[in-house]
Amino acid sequence: MKNQNEPKTVAESAVEMRFLVMPNDTNPQNSIFGGVVMSWIDMAAAMVAERHSNRPVVTVHVDDISFKAPMKIGDHALIQASINYVGKTSMLVGVKVIAENPFTGITRHTTTAYLAFVALDDIGRPIQIRGLIPETDDEKRRYQDGQERIEDMKKNKKR
């Protein structure tokens, strides 16, 4: 494990999870409840934030969640989460959900979300966290976008 102050790369804390969409996850139209997807997203994003900070974390804001397509019973849900931006005490995690039909292999992007977290010290207060090293052009773009999202969140909070 790295020193607590040493920056990490995006890849060092990224998480991928898979779930099978079961009948108890769905509504009468046989598509998944949004709340089930939201819980999967929050779980994956929290794991990313914990891996990055090596500290307990709490969700402080869900900046955006977009449901683009339904998932049906039997679909495989792939949850991809990675850290987009790190401030002094906050982290922004981006999550993409992809549904895969296991019989045809056809995939579709179903959900996107952005969640902000803070890491906590031993008595439950926000703590300064390590930096982030964006390496690829995509990671650098997401870092810039994440910085703007965090700034917008702070502006909206003041309103």
Image (cartoon, rainbow, N blue to C red):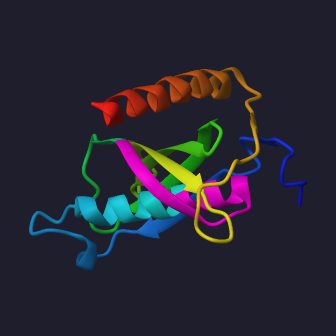
Task: Please say if 32 is above or below 23.
Answer: above
Q: Is residue 77 visible?
A: no
Quadrant (top left, top right, bottom left, bottom right) of the C terminus: top left
Q: Looking at this view, is 127 or 137 the one in front?
A: 127
Q: Position of residue 39 (x, y in %)?
A: 38, 65
Q: Is residue 141 visible?
A: yes
Task: Please say if 23 is above or below 74.
Answer: below
Instruction: Name the residue rendered at 63%, 66% in the picture.
Output: 56
**Residue furthest out toward the left:** 28
- Give yes or no for residue 61 being in the magenta stretch: yes
119 horizontally vs 67: left or right: right
Q: Position of residue 55 (x, y in %)?
A: 69, 63
Instruction: Name the residue rendered at 27%, 73% in the picture.
Output: 25
Instruction: Name the residue rendered at 27%, 63% in the picture.
Output: 35
Q: How many marks are shown on the rendered structure?
A: 0
150 horizontally vs 49: left or right: left
Task: Please say if 19 is above or below 14.
Answer: below
Q: Give the magenta part as a residue range.
A: 46-63
103 horizontally vs 54: left or right: left
Q: Quadrant of residue 33?
A: bottom left
- Give yes or no for residue 56 being in the magenta stretch: yes
Q: Quadrant of residue 21?
A: bottom left
116 horizontally vs 111: left or right: right
Quadrant (top left, top right, bottom left, bottom right) of the N terminus: bottom right
Instruction: Name the residue rendered at 66%, 54% in the picture.
Output: 127
Q: Position of residue 84 (x, y in %)?
A: 59, 36
Q: Position of residue 89 (x, y in %)?
A: 62, 45
